[in-house]
Amino acid sequence: MAYDYEKSLRPGKLPHIWCPGCGHGIVMKGLLRAMDTCGLEKNNTALVSGIGCASRLPGYVDMCTLHTAHGRAAAFATGVKMARPEMNVIVMGGDGDGTAIGGNHFIHACRRNIDMTYVIMNNFIYGMTGGQFSPCTPTGDKASTTPYGNPDPTFDISKLAIGAGATFVARTTAFHATQIDKLIAEGIKHKGMAIIEVLDDCPTTYGRRNKFRSVVDMMKRLKDIAVPVTAAGKMTAEQLEGKILTGVLYKEDKPEYCEQYAKVIARAKGAK
Amino acid sequence: MAKKVALMQGNEACAHGAMYAGCTFFGGYPITPSTEVAEVLSNELPKVGGKFIQMEDEIAAMASVLGASLTGAKVLTATSGPGVSLKQELIGYACIAEIPCVIINVMRGGPSTGMPTGPGQSDVQQAKWGTHGDHATIALVPASVQEIFTETVRAFNLAEKYRMPVQVLYDEIVGHMRERIEFPEPGELEIINRTLPTVPPEQYKPYDTSFGDVPPLAAFGSGYRFHVTGLNKAQDGFPTTKAEYVDAEERRQVRKVEGEVARAQIELNEEYLTEDAEVLIFAYGSTSRSARYAVNELRKEGIKAGLFRPLTLWPFPEKRISALGKQVKAIIVPEMNLGQMNLEVERVVKGSCPVISIGRVDGEPLNPGQIIAQVKEVK
Ligand SMILES: Cc1ncc(C[n+]2csc(CCOP(=O)(O)OP(=O)(O)O)c2C)c(N)n1
Ligand code: SF4
Ligand SMILES: [Mg+2]
């Protein structure tokens, strides 16, 4: 029997705004399955996003949804979680939203290790505004503002998250659709900041400028560059050249921010 | 029973006013001359189970209070000019999404880093026009430590009642000055909380105008699911580009503050010897204290001067200023800026009398002597 996505979607809000072949829809389906696996209560889950094609996702999902301003999702989500720690908080957004304009909020949310799950949809480009380069566009690639090739070095989002203090960091791709929900579900269950980076595709503004002839080509590339972190140990540096590691890249138990603040409250109220 | 009395700083009074109003969440970023507000609240809020968070910058601070407000918390952030400039993006978000919040701006010299420890009043037009797009503004301008307490309470009330950001602007002088303050007893000042929906969750629309110009706001996590966005939206909260929906929502959001009935409830002014005044001084904040002194001195010399002191700066007291413009020979507007509110006075009196600006931006308070000299010149 086909999986019932409708039960988690808002009636009457489809069709979505995404182009045919856009990877964001695959990630949304993964999110819905993960919510199911974790038994998240709709009324008790806040889905927060910034601005971009990726960030339009919450509008379709039947939860408490907050479509904020460009880059600010993690900071809004921090307020939601601090004020109501019993709520599940999930952030969804693009690579540009999360690592350029929202980069500061991203690293500080990681540093606090506040209990939320941040799914960052990395399509290597500013899709919504028509394909300008983002901090995640590979060096040398073409974007509407890098007609001679991108001179900028690239962020490794997962490394950034680990360095900033996130205690669960995982990566997968839109090709590995069934891994998406597994990793998101693990992230939701993890107490602390969980970052799930999903490499996906924007055929409309990135693919066509970078010699991908079809969405299938783009998916093939995602398939080819992914190496499960569990397999990487047996591979040579040469074999790993140009590859990205997928799976759970980092996991650590560390005090969670709201729990730490609960101790502040206890001390303020006179506990020793 | 005698009231509790203390000698305290304006910024401390602001924090205590917030606690009295029922504030349960503060998100901030340190900046002189506002920092004491955060320091006091970091101490007071957890005592009552409230939350204090120091964010990574003022944009994040503003975002955190908006997120918290959507869960039903009464929220505050405090900053000064450079921080207010950063907050503008999300002040606009709070306007369009209609999220109650209070923003304290302890004004210093500017632009940019300006004079961190010097007073200024140069953010008063920014309060109205700082964020892009058409929107309503409520801004309050207390002039004493006692008034910072009561106006902070009023700011919370207005934010909750009208479902929007309310700014409280006071200059560094009143922010750091120590004065006697009498604490109101619990229950003595009115406390207003936002209207919650009474309809069942499946019928709830976050911008349902069948409940009037200020629709009830549900809290995330309370059993109501809805969508919040900074895009133009219809009454159901979902984005729309349909002209008639966008137009109706935009106009309602301005009307809810600038309509006749709302204005009467939001505007608050003090008039001192204006009945027979021939020269009017329009002054707010610490400058109004110099102005009052000047009026007393001038009256001793038989010069009929009067003071109009707004406590609500925005919406601007148009009706009363227009009437006074027809009564007096001139209106003098002393401000610690190079002439900002005088433009609004001029707009409103429509040429019925001259409007004279006295500006000062050297980090020194505007003194009564300057005002007295100007009044004598027009007499
Ligand atoms: C303050 C601000 N600056 C710029 C923009 C324009 N803008 C909208 S979406 C976007 C890029 C989004 O890219 P990304 O987050 O990668 O999402 P995608 O569209 O690729 O899914 C930009 C620059 C904006 N909305 N707000
Ligand atoms: S522009 Fe790109 S990111 Fe945006 S919807 Fe289309 S394919 Fe997806
Ligand atoms: Mg992108």
Image (cartoon, rainbow, N blue to C red):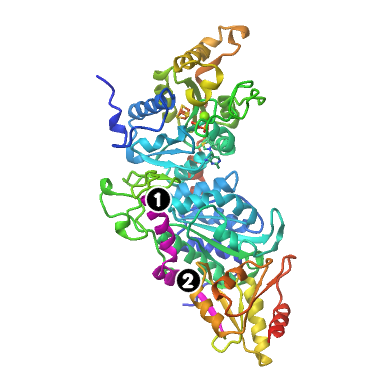
| In the rendered image, the vertical position of residue A255 relative to residue B102, given as above or below | above
How far is mark 1 from mark 2, CA to CA?
Answer: 28 Å
- Give the structural element (helix, strand or loop) at label 2: loop
Q: Are marks 1 and 2 on the same chain?
A: yes
Residue type, mark 2 in image: Glu
Q: Residues within 10 Å of mark 1 (few under 14, many from 20)?
A: some
Q: Nearer the viewer, residue A78 or B215?
A: B215
Mark 1 residue type: Val
Residue at position x 31%, y 37% from top? A10
**Is residue A105 located in the magenta-colored stretch of the structure?**
no
Residue B43 place in picture, x, y as percent: 55, 55
For residue A226, above or below residue A13: above
Determine the chain carrying the residue at label 1.
B
Q: Which of B197/B94 is in front? A: B94
Which residue carries the number 1 mark?
B246
Q: Main secondary structure of the magenta part?
A: helix
Q: Chain of mark 2?
A: B
Left or right of B224: which side holds B16?
A: right
- Looking at the image, tell me whether mark 1 or mark 2 is earlier in sequence order: 1
- Of circles 1 and 2, the one toward us is 1
Q: Position of residue B300 (x, y in %)?
A: 67, 91
**Residue drawn at x 55%, y 35% as measured from the top left:** A106
Mark 2, Cα crowd under 10 Å, few <14 / some 14-19 / many 20+, is many
Query: Which residue, given by chain and number where applicable, does mark 2 sit on?
Result: B267
Residue A210 x/y as whole percent: 56, 19
Identify the magenta region: B244-272
Q: Is mark 2 within 8 Å of ligand 1?
A: no
Tell me where residue B163 sits by quadrant: bottom left
In the rendering, at what x and y percent does residue B308 appear?
57, 78
When the figure is inspected, residue B17 is found, relative to residue B24, above or below; the finding is below
